[in-house]
Amino acid sequence: MASLSDMILQQVKAATTKVEIPSDIKDTVVSGLSSSVLGSLTQTASKAGGIDIVKNLLTGKADAATSPVTSLATKLFTNNVLSGLKADTGLKSTLTGLVPTVVGKLGGLLKDQDGDGDVDVNDIIIALTGKNSSASVLGAAKGLLGGLFKK
């Protein structure tokens, strides 16, 4: 099973092929956009009510264009990646516009990962980590809860 990180990277690569990005910044853009989307998902999941937001987005029940995940991913991408790039504002604007496209492509990707018949927090953790073992699920849950409770 591909991890959510792999799925995001695949969507980012597909989206960036439609934009003329100078070769000297392409890798930075691809990795930065991927990490911004994944970072937004994990940060959102660690907040109160965040698991439901992520679940609804990844199961296709929420609109990516209005999702807080998309807003945060755009903010992360703009602040952490685009602000340091030497590119014109037109290209930066075009690249920022890719965020909702990439996040939108993730809708419907989350399915029952652990075989219990429903999509729940375990499935989100498995999708985020790409691992299906109780130890990795427990470790990921501790990480998410630690972020939530600042421990």
Image: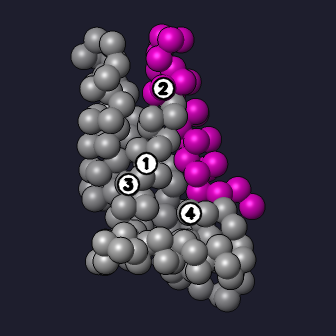
Sequence order check, earlier mark of 2 and 3: 2
Q: Residues within 10 Å of mark 1 (few under 14, many from 20)?
A: many
Sequence order check, earlier mark of 4 and 2: 2
Q: Which residue is mark 3?
A: 40
Q: Are marks 1 and 4 in contact (CB under 8 Å)?
A: no
- In this rendering, the answer to whether 111 lies above or below 95 is below
Report helix, strand or loop for mark 4: helix
Q: Which residue is mark 2?
A: 28
The N terminus lies in quadrant: bottom right
- Apparent side of residue 145 relative to residue 133 in the rendered image (left or right): left
- Apparent side of residue 71 relative to residue 125 in the rendered image (left or right): left
Q: Are marks 1 and 3 in contact (CB under 8 Å)?
A: yes
In the rendered image, is residue 77 in sight?
yes
Going by the numbered disc 3, the residue's amino acid type is: Ser
Sequence order check, earlier mark of 4 and 3: 3
Going by the numbered disc 4, the residue's amino acid type is: Leu
Quadrant of residue 118 within the rendered picture: bottom right
Q: Residue at x 58, y 33 (%)?
A: 14
- Apparent side of residue 66 relative to residue 100 in the rendered image (left or right): left
